[in-house]
Amino acid sequence: MSAVTAATSSPANAAGKSAPARLSAAFVSRLVIIVPYLWLLFFFLVPFIIVFKISLSQTAIAMPPYTPVLDFRGGIPGFISGLGALNFDNYTWLTQDALYFNAYVTSVVVAAISTVLTLLVGYPIAYGMARAPATIRPTLLMLVILPFWTSFLIRVYAWIGILKPEGLLNQLLLASGIISQPLIILNTYTAIFIGIVYSYLPFMVLPLYSSLEKMDHTLIEAAKDLGCPPTSAFWKITFPLSLPGVIAGCLLVFIPAVGEFVIPDLLGGSQTLMIGRTLWNEFFANRDWPVSSAVAVILLLLLIVPIMIFQRAQARAQEQDQ
Amino acid sequence: MTRKALWLSATSAFLAVFTLGAHAEDRVVNVFNWSDYIDSSIIDDFTKETGIKVVYDTFDSNEILETKLLAGGSGYDVVVPSGNFLARQIQAGVFQKLDKSKLPNISNMWDTVMERTAKYDPGNEYSINYMWGTVGIGYNIKKVQAALGTDKIDSWDVFFNPESLAKLKDCGVYVLDSPADIIPAALKYLGLDPNSTSPDEIAKAEETLLKVRPYIRKFHSSEYINALANGDICLAVGWSGDVFQARNRADEAKQGVEIGYSVPKEGAQMWFDQMAIPADAQHVAEAHEFLNYMMKPEVIAKSSNYVLYANGNKASQQFIDKAILEDPAIYPDAATLQKLYTVSPYDPKTQRIITRTWTKIVTGQ
């Protein structure tokens, strides 16, 4: 989006200059647009087409473990006959076993609940940071980012030590007499929620903070002067103004959480059926690259919808700004 | 500042590429083995003796290795898959035949083991045994004593009998998340052929496992090492070497946790980790030298003494610590050895049934 605006505005700026200068400016701005498109082409579209192609193939005991492998060794006719062998059987297969549907639903539900929880935890943090004296804000920001300096895997492992029946949390609660029986948290959905909220919190806090920090505080003062109580001032002014941050944060948490594999595997119980696990099973246990590719394509489609909603919201917000 | 750092890293990346190119004539062998699976001094000694540099990389699941191999161009010269994975990979054309003329130390190998590995690799043409072990029951001696009134486990009954497993539920039961290890055990317990591919018999195994499912805390293929060692659980169906690792960690921690391992009397599955050379390996001569070195009796004995697994090298047994050689959990006696079974790889159709059955057992769906 920003690339497009840059492209349309820069020739106008160059209008007063000589013709070659204008040309090179146009060339540079075109280059600037090309970069994100090339990025998308090589790191999104090409891999997607490869995965999509595999999802139309059949498994085989071979290297790579599917047929047909499209290449030009058999010349153009060989390539075309290879294309003819592709079909949508793997997608039909996904509809025949309720397993896949259930796994998608569970993943979306788990991701949605985790996103709401992360928002509930993250909003007050971001709000507090944005209202803190400007001198300590960089420090607070640093503190939010700091956990990233430790390996993600180690941090998730640490939660096993905290949540297990003989773990730190239970020892603390037992010693303080709040509970008499250790809580069973590890290997449940609760543990997964804790893990996701903890791991993704910075992704929620940072966009929220950036939109809350930009907010004009005099608006709240004006509301106060006009007799608006603080709670309704929050809901009428602060929250709507922070909405772009809320949407960005929620998507940054929701999208990776849907496909999350590590956290459910380590903290969740064996009964957790999520799409990441199903994909793993298809790919590694069944060695069925085509079916697992089909699962991945559907997952991607599931994720593209929220991304598109996000894009729309952003475009609308930008229009409002102008 | 950032830009400078970027340039620096970019130039160093280029430099690295060029230096790699310059040293291409040095002799190198790229080895991909299981994590925690070798005494690292063996690698240093090999380099000292032959001048071949070893680039040693590790993995922790057969599936990861297989995916790299099937995708092709893994860049490894020696890899160590388990038997039933090896069999399928041979079929897929992943490996090259070994040049036995370059492997004189093959005469040290143990025929009892070779007979069995031939099931995966007919004629042992593609692979050499590195280590082997069993799938059995690891347990916390004191906790099992408290729950069952005995500290001796010798039968699958303790696990597959719902009444007995129910008593262990509260102190915790972990099971390998590996259908190819657990479903054959259930078939064996039922008196059926552990290699069965019949959907009806697999369904019977499923039924047996579903009955004990409520008493199993988690299916996971590595967490049980720590869980056993810390005393978090009292029983795990797992791989022999992992349980011994848990036993050693528990001994080192001195928290009073004692771990036992049992090869059930009904019979247990034997697994083999086999060294093989990928078809697209770049350093075939060096790979053969490495394999030959690993078949030296004193070398492989050193490895067994370190990782606590039995190896397939008969001549090495004189160099193996007495405690290990005489431990029936590591080197079972002849009678137990008779009862150990191997499991052939599944065809794709059966594999799908097995995976689906397993998902049902594990997740209830």
Image: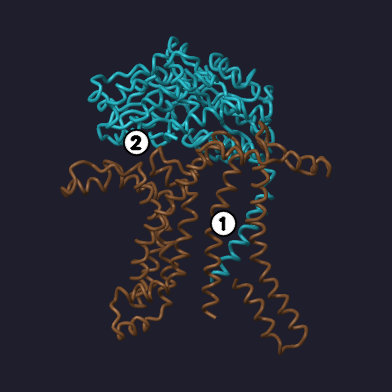
Chain colours: A brown, B cyan
**Which chain is indicated by disc 1?**
A
Report the amino acid beneath label 1.
Ile
x%, y% of residue B358? 47, 30
Q: Is residue A89 left or right of residue B342?
A: right
Q: Is residue A213 left or right of residue B167?
A: right
Residue that lies at the very extreme toward the bottom in this rendered image: A16
Report the amino acid beneath label 2.
Ala
Q: Nearer the viewer, residue A298 or A228?
A: A228
Residue occupied by mark 2 = B227
Q: Quadrant of residue B10?
A: bottom right
Q: Can the viewer see residue B292? A: no
Residue occupied by mark 1 = A304
SS for callout 1: helix
Point out the image quarter for the C terminus of chain A: bottom right
Which residue sits at x=42%, y=68%? A208
Q: Nearer the viewer, residue A317 or B350?
A: A317
x%, y% of residue B142? 25, 26
